Every structure is written in C-alpha cells, then in structure tokens.
Image (tube, rainbow, N blue to C red):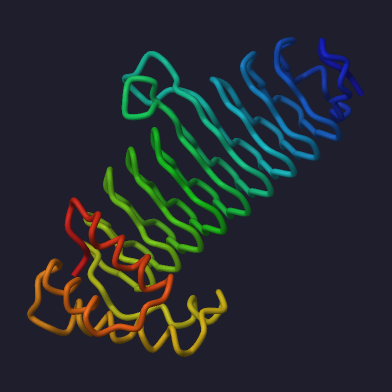
Amino acid sequence: MSSNKNNKVINISDNYKNSYIHPKAEIGKNVEIGPYSIIGPHVKIGDDTKIGTHVTITGDTFLGKANKIYHGVSIGSCPQGVKKEGQIFIGDNNIFREYVNIKSDSDRGNAETKIGNNNMIMAYCHISANCNISSDVIMSNATSIGEDVIIEDQAVVAGMTNVKEYVRIGRISMVGAHSNVLKDVPPYIIVDGHPAQVSGINVIGLRRNSIKPAVRREIKKAYKILYRSDLNIDEAIMEMDNTLNADQNIEYFLRFLRNVKRGICR
C-alpha cells in the first residue's frame, strides 16, 4: 500500500518499489498498479482501474473508472517523429489487452485522442494520434488505425486490419480480418478485403443491438439503393429520402453519407 501527495490510497502489488508513480499523478480509489509500470506527472486515473505490469502511461492522459490495462500497454507517448504529446481521454470500463499502443499529437487536428466506454481493444492494437473511438467497439488483435480515424458505437474491426488516416467507420458495421480500409465504411454493413470492399449487411450485429425487424427491412432497402443501383451517393441519398420510412437509424445512415469526404467502400 502507498499514497500520493493527495493522500489517496493506491493499491500496489508487493513489488511496488519496482514501479514509478510521479508524485503529481492523480490516482483514484482502489486502483491496482503492477510492478515495473510507470505513471507520469499529468496522468489522472479513475477509481477501480487495474493496471498490469510493465505499463507506461504518460502525457496529458485521463482514464475513467474500472478500466483494465494489461501487460506492456503504452498510453500517452507522442508519435514517432513528433516532439510533444497531445491529450488522451479514456472513459470507463474499457479493456486494453497486452501491448496496446495509444498515441496523441499536439500538432495535429484537435490534439486529442478520445476513447469512450466499454470497448475491447485486443493485444497489439495501435491507435494513432487524435483518433476518436466511441463506445462498445471491438478491435481485434494487431489492428492498426491511422491518425484522425473515427470508429463509431458498436463497430467491430477484425484482426490484423489496417485503417487509413481520416477514415470513418459507422456504427454497427464490421470490418473483416486482414482488411485494408482506404475509404469510409457506412453504418450497418460488412466490408472485407485488400482493399476493403462491401460484402453485405451486418445482420447479426443489427440483431445483437436490438434493431427492430421493421428497421432492418428499411436498412436492407437502403443498402440496395446504395449498392445495387447505378446511382452515385448524392442520387442514392435523394432516392432514400423519397422512399424509406423515417426512423432515427435511417436518418443517421443518411447523415453519415452526407458527410462522406473520402468516398465509401464499394
């Protein structure tokens, strides 16, 4: 047992002398920190978080409550070739498996990497500077995402996938393993391949996330308009506006398409 300058109790393993916690770090209640881990001066860690061995958390980094961080994870260091870190904000109940690497760059964009709640980031994943990962996202082993990537709620990115910088992956979509994602992935669909191409609707994901059958039917219609007609994106949006029943999920799908800047996976 030990405490920082704020007199908050830190729960550290028997080898706590082999870890380094900067006196200015803010550590919540019931936090566990394993041996050989390093916690920097500008780090804030929420209650009930468990940090394994050989973990490094530096930079201007905030972690919420009840996160689980496994062996060898690195959070907060600046990207290669960059001299100064940006900010990292991580929510609650996330799992970061072995050797996950999370960056932020103060010289780019909004200089902040954001990760929401209840995400599973599996071993050896790399999250580049200033990305925005929403909530309930699964990233499988050895996936690498470029700078300023957005991954929205309930998306699944399978293992050993590369996502190009500035790409946006919509909610309840799925990216197959070993894919190379060069363009935006619309909500509710599956893409796969090198480069990634559309392969269908994420029916299982829609069911798991309690999307009603009537809405799933409208999503199927939207998919056919977008991918089974000769219409471009603007024409497809107009056709959907005229033919689909109004619903928040359909409206979200249309908003996503209206904001596409890099094109979509086809």
Quarter the N terminus occupies:
top right
Which residue is at 64% across, 31% downward?
A: 55
Residue 160 image-quadrant placement? bottom left
**Coordinates of residue 185 in the picture (x, y in percent):** 30, 62
Q: Where is residue 196 drawn, in percent x and y?
A: 25, 65
| Residue beneath the point at 34% across and 62% down | 178
Q: Is residue 1 above or below residue 91?
A: above
Going 20% across and 82% down the picture, which residue do you hit?
A: 225
Q: Quadrant of residue 60?
A: top right
Q: Position of residue 262 (x, y in %)?
A: 18, 52
Q: Relative to 45, is 5 above or below? A: above
Where in the figure is residue 143, as x and y percent of width and height?
Answer: 42, 52
* 8 relative to 135 in the view: left or right: right
Q: How many numbered dots are placed on residues in this image?
A: 0
Nearest to the observer: residue 141 or residue 84? 84
Which is more toward the observer, 18 or 255?
255
Is 150 in front, or is 96? Answer: 150
